[in-house]
Image (spheres, rainbow, N blue to C red):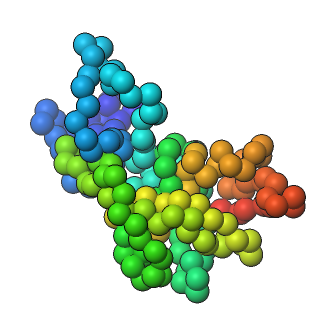
Amino acid sequence: EKRAKKLCHYCDEKFEPGHKCKRRQIYLLEKADDEELSDEGNKIGDDEEDHLVSLHAMSGAVSHQNMKIKGNIKKMRIIILIDSGSTHNFLDVSVAKRTGCEVQQDKPLMVAVANGSKIASAATCKQLVWSMQGREFRADMRLIPLEGCDMVLTIQWLSQLGPIFWGFKNLWMEFKWEERRMVLRGST
């Protein structure tokens, strides 16, 4: 439908050769150090998985693979995006500063943006504590600037939960946490 209307698939503006979206979007998180590639484009001598962040995670948009939850870090209210399309947990840099979380410098990872630029993520908050719907959680967070949300919980966090029942249509998810049933209800 977008092609028939000659619209960009990402930003809904008129598409023509050389088009660049006005709104920057992140597609991929890469290692910062130079890596030798084989002819097929695969990394040589590196078994580590690709580091991905979805477009929805960067913009805070709700899609079929994520949902927004209200939460708290200490007493500060935050918006959390639970996103099954990204690999690493992220916290907005300004939120890390405002909440006073302990920031540690880390091996830089480069975040590739749709317009070709890259953002470095060179810091983490180890074992950040936050709460959602009355329950406390903790996980490592990479720091990057986010828009539309304050924190992104991803496959890195979801994989620790065990079996999850996720109702995407009505924005809820259910899992066991500390031997108790937990139901998170998302907002639009």
Above or below residue 103? Residue 99 is: below
| Image-based side of 99 in relation to 77, left or right | left
Quarter of image, res 134: bottom right
Above or below residue 82? Residue 115 is: above
Residue 151 is situated, as x and y percent measured from the top left of the image, at 50, 64
Quarter of image, res 68: bottom right
| Image-based side of 112 in relation to 138, left or right | left
Residue 119 is situated, as x and y percent measured from the top left of the image, at 26, 54
Point 42% across, 42% down: residue: 52
**How many numbered marks does the figure carry?**
0
Point 45% across, 54% down: residue: 57
Residue 40 is situated, as x and y percent measured from the top left of the image, at 30, 14
| Image-based side of 29 in relation to 14, left or right | right
Q: Is residue 134 visible?
A: yes
Specify the quadrant that holds the N terminus: top left
Above or below residue 109? Residue 152 is: below
Q: Is residue 81 visible?
A: no
| Image-based side of 148 in relation to 176, left or right | left
Point 31% across, 52% down: residue: 108
View extreme (left): residue: 18
Q: Nearer the viewer, residue 33 or 3?
A: 33
Point 29% across, 48% down: residue: 110
Residue 47 is situated, as x and y percent measured from the top left of the image, at 44, 28
View extreme (bottom): residue: 75
Specify the quadrant that holds the C terminus: bottom right
Quarter of image, res 32: top left
